[in-house]
Image (cartoon, rainbow, N blue to C red):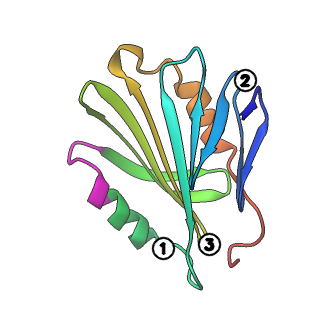
Amino acid sequence: MLSDTDTLTVGRWALQLARGWQAELEDDCVCITKPDGFGVMFISHANKLRTPVSSEELQQLAHAELPGSADLGSSRMGDFAGLHATYIEDNTRWHRFYLGFGTLLLLISYNIELAHDGLEDDDVIGMVRTLRAAGNAWE
């Protein structure tokens, strides 16, 4: 378990944890939480063979998963580019990121009950902005 502003490195990507947040690696997914916090972030990753992740692929993923009420737009977070969506479902605020760096795909989900909406946004967005990719885009 990593905590207290450690750098989380998983395969070809890394991010800086915000103070007080902890990460646990579970299979191909990372769960990031703050013990006294309210929300939870999950990051999963995949590597494509030979061809880079395209903006069309990110769009297809987003449209297949997101509800019609989602506010979707372009996003650049650290070394990664793609899409960011936010929406409310079942009394929960969701942030979803669909990001690519060459052949590396990251899917990031963060959710928090509406009663606490916005309380952790600075930490969550701050962590996602620190995303770094190892190697070149064609690995």
Q: Is residue 84 left or right of residue 101?
A: left
Instruction: Calculate the distance from the C-alpha at mark 3 to the C-alpha at mark 2.
Output: 30 Å
Res 35 label:
none
39 above or below 25? above
Quadrant where the C terminus is found in the figure = bottom right
Q: Is residue 97 left or right of residue 2?
A: left
Mark 3 or mark 2, whichever is nearer to me: 2
51 above or below 19? below
91 above or below 81? above
Instruction: Calculate the distance from the C-alpha at mark 2 to the C-alpha at mark 1.
Output: 33 Å
Q: Could you say whether the residue bearing mark 3 is in a helix, strand or loop?
A: loop
Q: Which residue is mark 1?
A: 54
Q: Position of residue 23 (x, y in %)?
A: 65, 36
Q: Residue at x 20, y 48 (%)?
A: 68
Q: What segment is highlighted magenta in the picture? A: 63-70
Q: Residue at x 75, y 72 (%)?
A: 136
129 above or below 3? below
Mark 2 or mark 1, whichever is nearer to me: 2
Quadrant where the N terminus is found in the figure = top right
Asked whether the residues under the numbered discs 3 and 2 touch, taking CB atoms below 8 Å apart as contact, a structural biologist would say no
Earlier residue among tags 1 and 3: 1
Q: Amino acid at mark 3?
A: Gly
Asked whether the residues under the numbered discs 1 and 3 touch, taking CB atoms below 8 Å apart as contact, a structural biologist would say no
Q: Which residue is mark 3?
A: 102
Q: Is residue 41 left or right of residue 80?
A: left
Q: Which residue is mark 2?
A: 19
Q: Amino acid at mark 1?
A: Ser
Q: Residue at x 60, y 23 (%)?
A: 34
Mark 1 closeness class: few <14, some 14–19, many ≥20 residues within 10 Å: some
Q: Position of residue 54 (x, y in %)?
A: 48, 73
Q: Amino acid at mark 2?
A: Arg
Mark 3 closeness class: few <14, some 14–19, many ≥20 residues within 10 Å: many
